[in-house]
Image: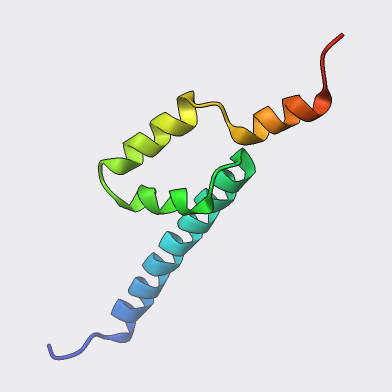
Amino acid sequence: MDSFSLWHWLILLVFLGTVVLGLWMMARVAAKAGYSGWWALLTMLPLLNFVMIWVFAFADWPALRERAWSAGPRQ
């Protein structure tokens, strides 16, 4: 077994495609929330991904603060 077959390469390509697509989607969510898209890389690290979820769940999102600030005072 000195080389991979076509099926092995196809499965590897599909797996890497889903990883890249998942990272891209997480980066888009982080950018819409007002954070850097680089936060998406934390989803690849086993314990730091829980920290990222904690931050997104309980922190004030910069995008929401900007929206509230641009809306002005409520009457």
Tell me if residue 16 comes above or below residue 23 in the rendering: below
Q: Residue furthest right?
A: 75
Q: Is residue 11 left or right of residue 29?
A: left
In depth, the one of 34 and 6 nearer the eye is 34
| Residue at point 34%, 42% (across, down) | 49
Tell me if residue 3 comes above or below residue 48 in the rendering: below
Residue 2 placement: quadrant: bottom left
| Residue at point 71%, 32% (across, down) | 66
x and y, in percent, of residue 47 in the image: 25, 41
Count up the numbered dots.
0
| Residue at point 61%, 41% (across, down) | 34
Tell me if residue 51 comes above or below residue 11 in the rendering: above
Q: Quadrant of the N terminus?
A: bottom left
In depth, the one of 43 and 36 nearer the eye is 36
Coloration mode:
rainbow
| Residue at point 39%, 74% (across, down) | 13
x and y, in percent, of residue 38 in the image: 47, 54
Q: Quadrant of the C terminus?
A: top right
Q: Residue furthest left?
A: 1
x and y, in percent, of residue 23 in the image: 46, 56
In depth, the one of 15 and 38 nearer the eye is 38
Q: Residue furthest bottom?
A: 2
Q: Is residue 39 left or right of residue 49?
A: right
Q: Is residue 75 left or right of residue 55?
A: right
Q: Is residue 41 left or right of residue 64?
A: left
